[in-house]
C-alpha cells in the first residue's frame, strides 16, 4: 500500500482542493507515482471518470476537484479517487453516488445513518487507489471540528483513524480568526483524533508573510503542532477550474471586454466550470448573475449552464424575471447557449412523469427552441468525442444527464457525438443547445464561435494553460511550504 498524507481544513473553502492539486504536481515532479483521494465530496460539479473493470465503455461520476487532481498527477481519473459524491437536489436532500454510480437519494438526516454502510465502499476504493502508487494525498471535507457528526464520519477523522493516515490541518487566514480556528480545533478534538494531526499550514496570506511570525508562535503555544509554512494568495489558482458553488460570487472577469457573457446563477447550478475557457479569453467578460438581479442588457451572449434540478431551476428562472430578460435579449439579436439542463430549459416543455426530480412533474420551458424533454430514470454518464455541426471542428467533453429531448429543432443538431446527432440549433442559428459539457474547452470551436459573435478569440490553449497553472501552484508551494517534511511524514 502506498504511503499517504491527508489535508483537512478548519472549515469549508479553505483551499484544500488547490493545495492537494499543487502537492500532487510537486510530488509528480519529484518522480513519485502520486494519486489523489477524497472519501466524500459534496458538489454538483461532477466529472466522468473510468470505472476499472467496467467493460460497458461508460463511466462514473466523481467531483471535478479529483478530476483536476488526477490531471496534476498525470494520470487518468478513476471513480475510486472519490468513492462517495453527494449531489444536492434540494435544500435538505441529495443524490448519492457511490463508486461512480447512483446509489440512491437521501435527506440530510437519513444520510447520516447511511454513512456507516458507505465506509466499506470508501475503504475498498482506498485500497484500489493506492495499489500502484508511491504516495496518496487525501483531501478532507468540511472540518474535523464538526464533532457533532464525528460518530459516523467518513470524510475527515473517521477516515483518517480507520486508514491510519496522518493529517495536516489547513487554516484560511483570509477569512480572519485563523489562530482561533486552529487552536479551537485542537481544543475540541478528542485525543484519538488530535494525535493524527502532524502539523498545520496557513493558506491565502496577503502581504508580508513575516508579519504572521507572532501568529505562528501563538498557534504553537496553544497546540504544540509544527508549522509547515504560510502559503500566499495563489494567483495561479484563478486559472484552475473551480468546484464549489460557494465561489460563484467571485467568478466574475474584471474590466470592459469586447463581449459580455451573462450566466444566471441557478439554484442547483452544475458544472459551471464549462465557462472557465470563456473566462480565460482576453476579450471576454463573464458575469455570473445572482438571483434577484436582472441579466445585463449589454450582454452579447447568455449561457444557461447545467442544473441538478432542471424543473426547479426553471421555475426559479421565471421568478427572477430572467425569462423576460432573455426574451428581450433575443429580440435585440442576442445569442443564447444552453448546456445540459440549460439546453432542456430552452425548449417548450420539460416533463418528469415519474417524479425523478421531485413533486413538480412538468414546467413550461423558455420557448427559444422547438423541442421538448422527458426525464427518464437511466442516467447517461460518459466521456465523448464529437464534432461541431455549425463550425465543423472537433469537440471533446462529457455527458452527465437524465432525459430525452425531441422536436423539430433537433433536425438541426449542434454536434455529432459518437456518431449520433446531439442538441439543437434555432432557425437563425443564434440559439444553441447541447448535452455535452466541455463545449468551450475545444480551442478550435471556441475561436470560431467567438468570431461568429464578432470577437477575436481562440488564441489560447486552454488545457495547456491549466497545466501551466498547476506547475505555478506547485512552484509556489515548494517555495513557501516544507514539502519535504510533509511528504516525509506520509505513512
Image: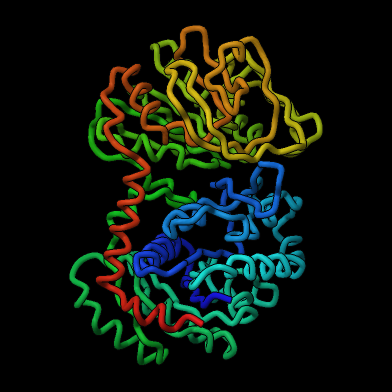
Q: Is residue 117 left or right of residue 454?
A: right
Up/down of 176 relative to 291, above or below: below
Quarter containing the N terminus = bottom right
**174 or 292: which is nearer to us?**
174
Location of residue 471 (image quadrant): bottom left
**353 or 60: which is nearer to us?**
60
Up/down of 289 relative to 39, above or below: above
Q: Is residue 309 left or right of residue 447?
A: right
Up/down of 273 relative to 333, above or below: below
Identify the residue at horizontal 66%, vertical 46% (top origin): 90
Location of residue 446 (image quadrant): top left
Q: Position of residue 343 (x, y in %)?
A: 57, 26
Q: Where is residue 202 in the image (x, y as percent from the top left)?
A: 34, 73
Q: Where is residue 371 in the image (x, y as percent from the top left)?
A: 64, 16
Identify the residue at horizontal 30%, vertical 83% (top origin): 216
Identify the residue at horizontal 48%, vertical 36% (top origin): 438
Q: Is residue 226 visible?
A: yes
Q: Is residue 161 left or right of residue 4?
A: right
Q: Where is residue 384 in the image (x, y as percent from the top left)?
A: 56, 35
Q: Is residue 93 visible?
A: no
- Toward the right, the furthest residue is 354
Q: Is residue 168 left or right of residue 473?
A: right
**215 or 140: which is nearer to us?**
140
Identify the residue at horizontal 74%, vertical 54% (top origin): 106
Amino acid at each position: 500500500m502506498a504511503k499517504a498524507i491527508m489535508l483537512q481544513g478548519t472549515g469549508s473553502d479553505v483551499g484544500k482542493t488547490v493545495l492537494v492539486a499543487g502537492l500532487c504536481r510537486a510530488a509528480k515532479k519529484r518522480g513519485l507515482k502520486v494519486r489523489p483521494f477524497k472519501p466524500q465530496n459534496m458538489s454538483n460539479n461532477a466529472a466522468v471518470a473510468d470505472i476499472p473493470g467496467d467493460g460497458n465503455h461508460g463511466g462514473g461520476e466523481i467531483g471535478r476537484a479529483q478530476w483536476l487532481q488526477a490531471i496534476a498527477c498525470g494520470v487518468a481519473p478513476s471513480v475510486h479517487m472519490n468513492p462517495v459524491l453527494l449531489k444536492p437536489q434540494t435544500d435538505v436532500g441529495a443524490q448519492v453516488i457511490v463508486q461512480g454510480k447512483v446509489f440512491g437519494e437521501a435527506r440530510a438526516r437519513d444520510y447520516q445513518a447511511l454513512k456507516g454502510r458507505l465506509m466499506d465502499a470508501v475503504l475498498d476504493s482506498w485500497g484500489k487507489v493506492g495499489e500502484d502508487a508511491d504516495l496518496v494525498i487525501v483531501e478532507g471535507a468540511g472540518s474535523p471540528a464538526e464533532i457533532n457528526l464525528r460518530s459516523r464520519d467518513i470524510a475527515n477523522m473517521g477516515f483518517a483513524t480507520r486508514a491510519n493516515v496522518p493529517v495536516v490541518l489547513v487554516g484560511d487566514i483570509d477569512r480572519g480568526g485563523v489562530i482561533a480556528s486552529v487552536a479551537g480545533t485542537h481544543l475540541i478534538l478528542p485525543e484519538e483524533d488530535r494525535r493524527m494531526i502532524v502539523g498545520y499550514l496557513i493558506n491565502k496570506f496577503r502581504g508580508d508573510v513575516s508579519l504572521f511570525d507572532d501568529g505562528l508562535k501563538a498557534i504553537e503555544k496553544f497546540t504544540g503542532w509544527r508549522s509547515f509554512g504560510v502559503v500566499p494568495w495563489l494567483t495561479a489558482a484563478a486559472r484552475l477550474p473551480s468546484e464549489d458553488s460557494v465561489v460563484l460570487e467571485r467568478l466574475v472577469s474584471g474590466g470592459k471586454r469586447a463581449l459580455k457573457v451573462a450566466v444566471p446563477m441557478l439554484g442547483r447550478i452544475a458544472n459551471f466550470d464549462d465557462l472557465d475557457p470563456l473566462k480565460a479569453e482576453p476579450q471576454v467578460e463573464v458575469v455570473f448573475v445572482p438571483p434577484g438581479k436582472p441579466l445585463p442588457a449589454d450582454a452579447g451572449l447568455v449561457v444557461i449552464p447545467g442544473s441538478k434540478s432542471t424543473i426547479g431551476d426553471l421555475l426559479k428562472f421565471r421568478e427572477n424575471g430572467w425569462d423576460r430578460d432573455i426574451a428581450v435579449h433575443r429580440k435585440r439579436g442576442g445569442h443564447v447557449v444552453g448546456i445540459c439542463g440549460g439546453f432542456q430549459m430552452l425548449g417548450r416543455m420539460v416533463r418528469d412523469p415519474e417524479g425523478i426530480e421531485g413533486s413538480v412533474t412538468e414546467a413550461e420551458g423558455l420557448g427559444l427552441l422547438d423541442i421538448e424533454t422527458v426525464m427518464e430514470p437511466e442516467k447517461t454518464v460518459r466521456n465523448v468525442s464529437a464534432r461541431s455541426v455549425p463550425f465543423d471542428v472537433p469537440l471533446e467533453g462529457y455527458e452527465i444527464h437524465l432525459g430525452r429531448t425531441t422536436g423539430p429543432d433537433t433536425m438541426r443538431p449542434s454536434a455529432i457525438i459518437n456518431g449520433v446527432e446531439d442538441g439543437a440549433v434555432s432557425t437563425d442559428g443564434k440559439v444553441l443547445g447541447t448535452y455535452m459539457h466541455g463545449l468551450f474547452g475545444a480551442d478550435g470551436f471556441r475561436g470560431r464561435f467567438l468570431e461568429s459573435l464578432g470577437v477575436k478569440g481562440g488564441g489560447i490553449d486552454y488545457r495547456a494553460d491549466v497545466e501551466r497553472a498547476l506547475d505555478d501552484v506547485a512552484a509556489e508551494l515548494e517555495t513557501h511550504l516544507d514539502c519535504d517534511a510533509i511528504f516525509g511524514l506520509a505513512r
